[in-house]
Image (tube, rainbow, N blue to C red):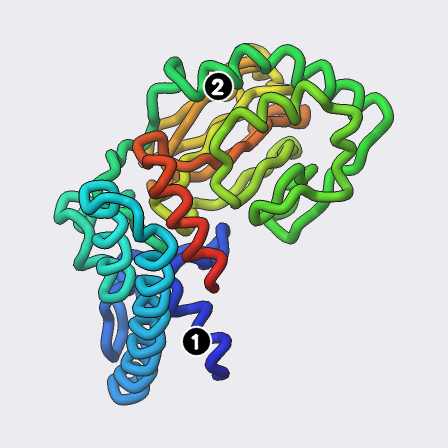
Amino acid sequence: RTHTMLLLSASSCFAPATELRCRGCHGSSGGTSRCGRISMGSAALSGEAAEEAYWRAWFWDKASEAVEEQFASAGKRALRRVREYIKVNRGDVAQGMPKKLRKHPHYDVVGGYFPGLSATPFLDASAAPFDAIRRAAPAIREELDGLLAREAEFEDIGKPLGWRTMPIYYRGERQASFPAEECPQTMGALGKLRLAGETVAFQRQSPGTGLPRHVDPCSWVVACHVGMVCPTGEEGGETPYISVAGEKYHWREGEVMVFDPSFKHETFNPTSQDRIILNIDLFHPELTDLECRVIQETIRLK
């Protein structure tokens, strides 16, 4: 593999959002893993692991130099968790996590880990900054209805059949395909939030479909869902839901839900109608503004 590929791997921040992980395979060095997969031979695995560890350490050493230079005026206390963040991601991420998370059957980090943040499947969506998006939900729904009326396109992005998206931001970049001029209330509400540089999109799930169980890459991101079009179940049946760490949440129109996507989660729409939500990837609310800027800088360095 090329050094470029290794550098991306070394950054520990950029695993695909749909990557599925089997906890039973972690740490296997040869033979058959607990989930039945045949792993690589120990010699080949150790050679590859050593190479990746070298380039991971190289990247994070360079990131540390850049952060110390750019944020030299920040106090020691302000940078305490930042330096721990760099240290953890430079080495074995799992070993840098608290034991209760490392051993948690529903928690996994496939990308970057930021220490010292609360980790719970669902967050309190009634407080700031999430209350602002709840107040804006009716206006956002009205603008979405306008897009639906003129049959604005939802894209198939290669996820399981039935999952389509209308991206507003992707990897932190506003998407030219989104008609922002038709959605001033939506854009205004988003502009007041600390977007995490991942995804903001209207997401549509067809009847009888869902996403398989998975985790998203980075522990500093929380996912905010705003119910837009949430069909009711036929004859009192179940409505569309997401299950996070084994606990179900059923989307409701105008309601805001926030969860930690480092916990294993899956979705399903058991109704005969499409479900649409607004998904907003946000920085964890316990991060300081400086810490958010540091994370953005390390992502930029990739």
Q: Position of residue 150 (x, y in %)?
A: 86, 26
Tag 2: Cα neighbours inside 10 Å, few (<14), some, or many (≥20)?
A: many
**Which residue occupies 33% across, 41% down?**
263
**Which residue occupies 52% across, 45% down?**
198
Using the image as rendered, state which of residue 235 and residue 137 is in the foreground. Answer: 137
Decide: is 201 above or below 161: above
Q: Residue furthest left?
A: 99
Total numbered labels: 2
Q: Looking at the rendering, which quadrant does residue 148 occupy?
A: top right
On screen, residue 108 versus residue 19, left or right, reads left
Question: Which residue is tagged 1?
Answer: 6
Distance (Cα) linking label 2 and label 1: 38 Å
Q: Position of residue 118 (x, y in %)?
A: 24, 34
Decide: is 183 above or below 96: above
Tag 1: Cα neighbours inside 10 Å, few (<14), some, or many (≥20)?
A: some
**Which residue occupies 25% across, 84% down?**
42
Question: Which residue is tagged 2?
Answer: 256
* Amino acid tagged 1: Leu
Decide: is 91 above or below 110: below
Q: Looking at the rendering, which quadrant does residue 53 occupy?
A: bottom left
